[in-house]
């Protein structure tokens, strides 16, 4: 097996910072950054104007996968032909789909 590499920023990139809700939610500083951030989102939603809602959206990207390596080996055009063949021709065996 290969070497494990870290593929995301620690904490998914959440910046450690004070939040307005810390005074009541975490006065002793015992909670994690994510717990404090979740409490802050709750605080924003409780205190926002009617019709305003704050949400957290995650956007993440995976590292290099085997499919990326194979596309580099065979070229994008050949890779796209293979992907279309596999996706739209169900029922073929691995031998029929082999390179």
Image (tube, grey):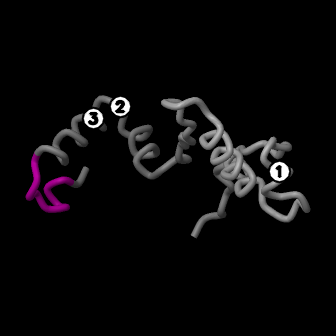
The residue wearing badge 2 is 76
Q: Residue at x 23, y 54 (%)?
A: 98
The residue wearing badge 1 is 22
- Mark 1 or 3, which is nearer the eye? 1
Residue 8 percent across, percent down from the top left:
66, 49
Q: Secondary structure at mark 1?
A: helix
Q: Residue at x 80, y 62 (%)?
A: 31
Residue 38 percent across, percent down from the top left:
66, 51
Q: Give the alpha-carbon distance from disc 2 to disc 3, as whole Å.
A: 6 Å
Q: Does residue 68 appear left or right of residue 55 in this picture?
A: left
Q: Does residue 55 appear left or right of residue 15 in this picture?
A: left
Few, some or many residues within 10 Å of mark 3 (<14, 14–19, 20+): few
Few, some or many residues within 10 Å of mark 2 (<14, 14–19, 20+): few
The residue wearing badge 3 is 80
Q: Which quadrant holds the N terminus? A: bottom right
Q: Give the alpha-carbon distance from disc 1 to disc 2, as whole Å.
A: 50 Å
- Mark 1 or 2, which is nearer the eye? 1
Few, some or many residues within 10 Å of mark 1 (<14, 14–19, 20+): some
* Mark 2 in CB contact with mark 3 (< 8 angstroms): yes
Residue 39 percent across, percent down from the top left:
69, 52
Asked whether 96 falls inside the magenta stretch, the response is yes
- Magenta-highlighted residues: 89-97
């Amino acid at each position: 097996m290969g070497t494990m590499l870290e593929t995301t920023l620690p904490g998914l990139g959440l910046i450690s910072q004070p939040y307005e809700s810390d005074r009541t939610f975490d006065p002793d500083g015992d909670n994690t950054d994510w717990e404090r951030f979740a409490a802050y989102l709750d605080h924003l939603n409780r205190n926002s104007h009617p019709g305003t809602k704050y949400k957290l959206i995650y956007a993440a990207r995976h590292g290099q996968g085997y499919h990326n390596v194979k596309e580099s080996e065979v070229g994008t055009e050949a890779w796209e032909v293979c992907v279309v063949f596999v996706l739209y021709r169900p029922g073929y065996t691995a031998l029929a789909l082999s390179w």
